[in-house]
Image (spheres, rainbow, N blue to C red):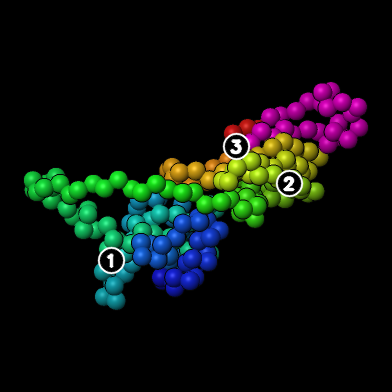
Amino acid sequence: MTRTASYCQRKARTITPFYSEASQFCALDPNSVESSCKGDSGGPGIAMRPDGTPVQLGIISLGRPNCSLASPEIMARVERVSPWVTSWINAVEAGAPAPPVAAPPPIRLPRLTFRAAGYLINVALTGTFGNRWSRGKSKDARCERIGREKIKCNIFWYYDRRVYTGGITIYFSLPREGEIWNYTFRIKRYNAYCWVYSPSLRRCRSVLFYR
């Protein structure tokens, strides 16, 4: 079912700082057993009419990074793009004049807040380390702003007799493959006993994870 604009705007804030009621809507099917996920962007958002026939309402845009069934999917409104699509179909297939192409206005990226950076760090490290991060103990992130759209954090946590420590940078960027945020990190894993008792970390073997 489609949801109200205020609901969509509230839920969208944890995924993207950009949301336009005129161009987008969100939907959530409480009875669904699957959700769109990475790679589905650009696909059709289909609903069923009362008589059971399918109709496309939206174009899949984005959702939670973990593809949660409990989170709404945000879609572009078909009615906003269908006249443009129809014009190009007529131009390619029937020789009609090609529609004009207007250059988009410059995009000003939003300011990245520390709260948003914390959420995105959790998404990034869960996607990379799975339970080693989500079930980790003694988590600590000390962050500093290094730009309007960029925050860097020194990160530390403990899991299964291993210590993970390093740095991660979260930043907003121009949309690429459906993402408007990205991250880099360099994190080393150490044996916790060596980490605690060795007089020098150089004597401890480490495994480097980076992106």
Can residue 46 be seen here? The reply is no
| Residue 9 drawn at (x, y percent) | 49, 66
The region drawn magenta spans: 184-208
Splitting the image into 4 quarters, where does residue 3 fall? bottom left
Q: Is residue 175 left or right of residue 162?
A: left
Q: Earlier in the sequence, mark 3 or mark 1?
A: 1
Instruction: Give the label on residue 141, or none.
Output: 2
Please state which of the two labelled residues, at mark 3 or mark 1, is closer to the viewer: 3
Q: What element does badge 3 sit on?
A: strand
Q: What element does badge 1 sit on?
A: strand
Q: Mark 1 points at which residue?
A: 54
Instruction: Give the label on residue 184, or none.
Output: 3
- Identify the residue at image location x=65%, y=52%: 114
- Identify the residue at image location x=84%, y=23%: 203
| For residue 160, above or below residue 24 | above
| Residue 83 drawn at (x, y percent) | 21, 58
| Label 3, label 2: how far apart the Cα atoms are | 15 Å
- In the image, 16 versus 191, the foreground residue is 16
Quadrant placement of the C terminus: top right
